[in-house]
Image: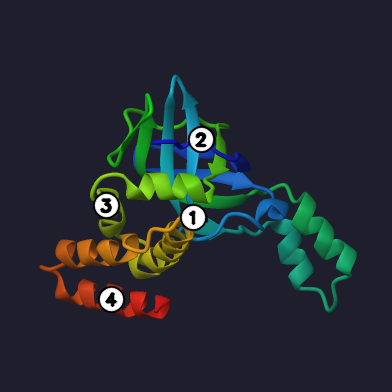
Amino acid sequence: MNLEGQKIAIGKLLRADNSHFVAGCRVRELETPALGSLCKVDLGENLEVYGLITNIIINDDGLVRQMVSGVSIPSEYTADNRYNRNLPVEIHVLTVGYQSEGAIHHYLPPRPPLSLDVLYLCDDAQLVDFTAHGRFGYFRHILRMMDSPVEELLVCHLGQARAAHEAAGDTAWYPAACKELITLLRDDYVKLASVLNALAELE
């Protein structure tokens, strides 16, 4: 598998464990990352950890609280706060696999990334390579999430992955992905119905 490609830095890690990590970025870098996007962190020693963006949080600060209580806010104040604010935007990422010595694995990595490691957005070629590997093993990480809207994450991720696969000439990937989700959720009718209803938005 070839997971080499463009490297688009979208943030630096704040904290991490084996199953999740959080990166911080400036507001000006928010044009690139999106919910459901595949990203990665290079740990060195031929080891890269892959994850899906599950949430993007913009925290407030004391200045923002003062500004929103004002009658009017000059545009230059708003721009300065957005682009020069001290608190970073937080990008929350679910770990979905890793690459070691050129081989892709859809289970948790042997160790998490470290603070200040750089978070990169994967390009379409990397997205295709990662999602085409194996039999959708990374779906289990998504489906066991408890505190996030799984259906919305799947719609965003599968929409991006479907477009990348079809652009590469592979029209069979998306139907196969839907079939696998039905198999995985066959014993949970409520969640299956919710997922299928959300995926109908992609048609």
Q: Closer to us: mark 1 or mark 2?
A: 2
Look at the numbered disc 3 and give the secondary structure of its residue: loop
Look at the numbered disc 1 and give the secondary structure of its residue: loop
* Dot 1 crowding, Cα within 10 Å, few <14, some 14–19, many 20+: many
Q: Disc 3 and disc 1: Cα gap in Å?
A: 16 Å
Find disc 2 in the rendering and name its residue: 4
Name the kind of residue labelled 3 in the image: Phe
Name the kind of residue labelled 2 in the image: Glu
Residue 108 at what x, y percent from top left?
30, 38
Q: Earlier in the sequence, mark 2 or mark 3?
A: 2
Q: Which quadrant of the figure contains the N terminus?
A: top left
Residue 189 at what x, y percent from top left?
15, 75
* Dot 4 crowding, Cα within 10 Å, few <14, some 14–19, many 20+: some
Q: Earlier in the sequence, mark 1 or mark 2?
A: 2
Q: Is residue 83 left or right of residue 104?
A: right
Q: Is residue 193 left or right of residue 110?
A: left
Q: Disc 2 and disc 4: Cα gap in Å?
A: 33 Å
Name the kind of residue labelled 1 in the image: Ser
Look at the numbered disc 4 and give the secondary structure of its residue: helix
Name the kind of residue labelled 4 in the image: Leu
Find disc 1 in the rendering and name its residue: 37
Residue at 75% x, 58% y is 82
Residue 173 at what x, y percent from top left?
33, 60
* Dot 3 crowding, Cα within 10 Å, few <14, some 14–19, many 20+: some
* Dot 2 crowding, Cα within 10 Å, few <14, some 14–19, many 20+: few
